[in-house]
Image: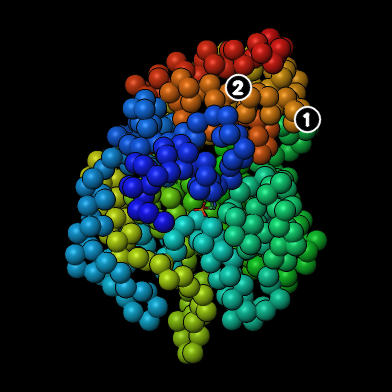
């Protein structure tokens, strides 16, 4: 194959043609790009990105909840290059290097309570995979070798590798790959917008206890939950939910994993989502904004109790990835965390989250917007056919609404956000954490006419 440059210039045609011919895009219906251009993003600056034609877009999703510090931060990328001058790569298997050590100590100092031991990975699925294996081996070493099951919530996304997929509660993602790793069990999520009348929200946490009883407490290793569940559309926990989940986990000797691949590093205005809701997990899984995605990296942060059995005698966590704790990624993560602190990124979220909420809530004036929910800089608008009854759209209607109109039209008007129907149809917004009222107004000024038009097209009851 010729060099990419030669191929682009002469032999193989434009980037569009090369993308269609060679690039296997993730979770993407590639047939959609037979007739439409592949959106090719070439540059980023702050809250904005630019496509190959120079058109500007507000990145209302932080490139899938990743670029929390904003785009175009050469200083953060430079930290990786500076590190490469000393040591471009060395492994964390039996050896260590300064950036991974410093980052582990830094993350431990930020994490709540006794979450002091940091196991690095290359991304979110690897973090979840590692946490599930860690839970199993922990129980094996502490006298409960039959504890292997994991309880997660319906429609929650915890990653795509086989173990993580076992926890993922989205049928359409699981079905093509069955049978999965054994032991995945699911309970209702905290979708309080659609709770049946008379249903007491306290039953949502009790469902976990009931499921543990049903499965047999001696077989359950872990419960994995996001502080705010992404898939389905930013389901926040009801008051007291996590407090009760923590009690249940303690009662049954089950580890509580807080999956914060999205919620950590400022998304909810705190370093970790668990802090926002006041609970103490046994492990936190992270990725994405640890480096603000200037390099791929994830981490499992484990409590002293979970780490303890691995620190004596001949024991070790018999698991690892070559690139875990990569020195360049570690240096970039440290620079990213420095920038968070220096520039008051968490403070910016706290100062502006009410403004984001009220801007988005103003869209409830539109008949199609049934619910606005979320926290921090992490929001979903649920789209409904009938606000009075909360009736949703059929699968076919949802397809027409989201893929036939909304996704394309919002992008055409310069807003990148997520139109998602893994649960009921939602629009998700999750801007970079440096955003403020100017960006919120821009989001609203694009969403309002497009959602109004969508309501008319779908003959929504007004
Ligand atoms: C909560 C959660 N867990 C795990 C993952 C998997 O992360 P990755 O795509 O980096 O493998 C994601 C991805 O979005 C996620 O949102």
Is 372 displayed left or right of 292 in the figure? right
Instruction: Give the mark, 2 or 1, whose residue is nearer the N terminus.
Output: 1
Gap between marks 2 and 1, in whole Å?
33 Å
Can residue 62 be seen by looking at this rendering? no
- Looking at the rendered structure, the number of numbered marks drawn on it comes to 2
| Element type at mark 2 | helix
Q: Nearer the viewer, residue 461 or 37?
A: 37
The verdict on label 2 being within 8 Å of ligand 1 is: no
Callout 1: few (<14), some (14-19), or many (20+) C-alpha neighbours within 10 Å?
Answer: few
Checking the image for residue 197, the label placed there is 1
Q: Residue at x 63, y 47 (%)?
A: 156
Q: Foreground mark, 2 or 1?
A: 2
Q: Residue furthest bottom?
A: 313
Residue at the spot of label 2 = 405
Percent position (x, y) of residue 186? 72, 53
Percent position (x, y) of residue 130? 53, 66
| Element type at mark 1 | loop
Can residue 6 be seen by looking at this rendering? yes
On screen, 248 above or below 190? below
Quadrant of the drawing holding the C terminus: top right
Checking the image for residue 358, the label placed there is none
Callout 2: few (<14), some (14-19), or many (20+) C-alpha neighbours within 10 Å?
Answer: some
Q: Nearer the viewer, residue 450 or 249?
A: 450
Is 223 displayed left or right of 447 in the figure? right
Residue 401, quarter of the rendered image: top right
């Amino acid at each position: 194959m010729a060099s990419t440059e030669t191929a682009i210039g002469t032999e193989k045609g434009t980037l569009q043609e090369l993308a269609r011919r060679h690039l296997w895009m993730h979770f993407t219906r590639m047939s959609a790009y037979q007739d439409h251009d592949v959106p090719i993003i070439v540059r980023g600056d702050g809250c904005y990105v630019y496509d190959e034609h120079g058109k500007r877009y507000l990145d209302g999703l932080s490139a899938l909840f990743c670029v929390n510090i904003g785009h175009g931060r050469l200083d953060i990328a430079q930290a990786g290059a500076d590190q490469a001058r000393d040591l471009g790569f060395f492994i964390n298997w039996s050896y260590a290097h300064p950036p991974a050590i410093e980052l582990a100590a830094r993350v431990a100092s930020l994490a709540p309570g006794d979450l002091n031991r940091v196991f690095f990975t290359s991304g979110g699925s690897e973090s979840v995979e590692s946490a599930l294996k860690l839970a199993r081996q922990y129980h094996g070493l502490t006298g409960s070798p039959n504890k292997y099951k994991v309880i997660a919530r319906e429609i929650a996304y915890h990653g795509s590798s086989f173990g993580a997929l076992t926890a993922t509660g989205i049928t359409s993602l699981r079905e093509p790959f069955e049978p999965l790793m054994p032991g995945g069990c699911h309970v209702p999520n905290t979708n309080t917008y659609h709770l049946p009348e008379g249903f007491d929200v306290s039953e949502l946490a009790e469902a976990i206890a009931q499921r543990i009883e049903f499965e047999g407490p001696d077989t359950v290793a872990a419960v994995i939950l996001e502080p705010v569940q992404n898939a389905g559309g930013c389901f926040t926990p009801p008051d007291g939910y996590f407090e009760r989940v923590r009690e249940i986990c303690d009662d049954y000797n089950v580890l509580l994993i807080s999956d914060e691949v999205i919620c950590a590093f400022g998304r909810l205005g705190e370093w970790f989502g668990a802090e926002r809701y006041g609970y103490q997990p046994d492990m936190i899984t992270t990725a994405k904004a640890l480096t603000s995605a200037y390099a791929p990296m994830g981490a499992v942060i484990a409590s002293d109790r979970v780490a303890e059995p691995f620190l004596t005698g001949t024991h070790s966590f018999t698991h690892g990835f070559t690139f875990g704790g990569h020195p360049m990624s570690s240096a970039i993560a440290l620079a990213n965390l420095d920038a968070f602190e220096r520039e008051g990124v968490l403070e910016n979220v706290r100062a502006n989250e009410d403004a984001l909420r009220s801007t988005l809530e103003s869209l409830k004036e539109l008949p199609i917007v049934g619910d606005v929910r979320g926290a921090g800089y992490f929001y979903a608008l649920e789209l409904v056919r009938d606000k009075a009854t909360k009736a949703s759209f059929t699968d076919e209607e949802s397809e027409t609404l989201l893929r036939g109109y909304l996704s394309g039209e919002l992008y055409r008007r310069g807003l990148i956000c997520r139109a998602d129907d893994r649960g009921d149809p939602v629009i998700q917004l999750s801007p970079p954490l440096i955003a403020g009222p100017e960006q919120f107004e821009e989001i609203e000024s694009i969403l309002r006419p497009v959602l109004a038009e969508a309501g008319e097209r779908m003959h929504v009851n007004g």
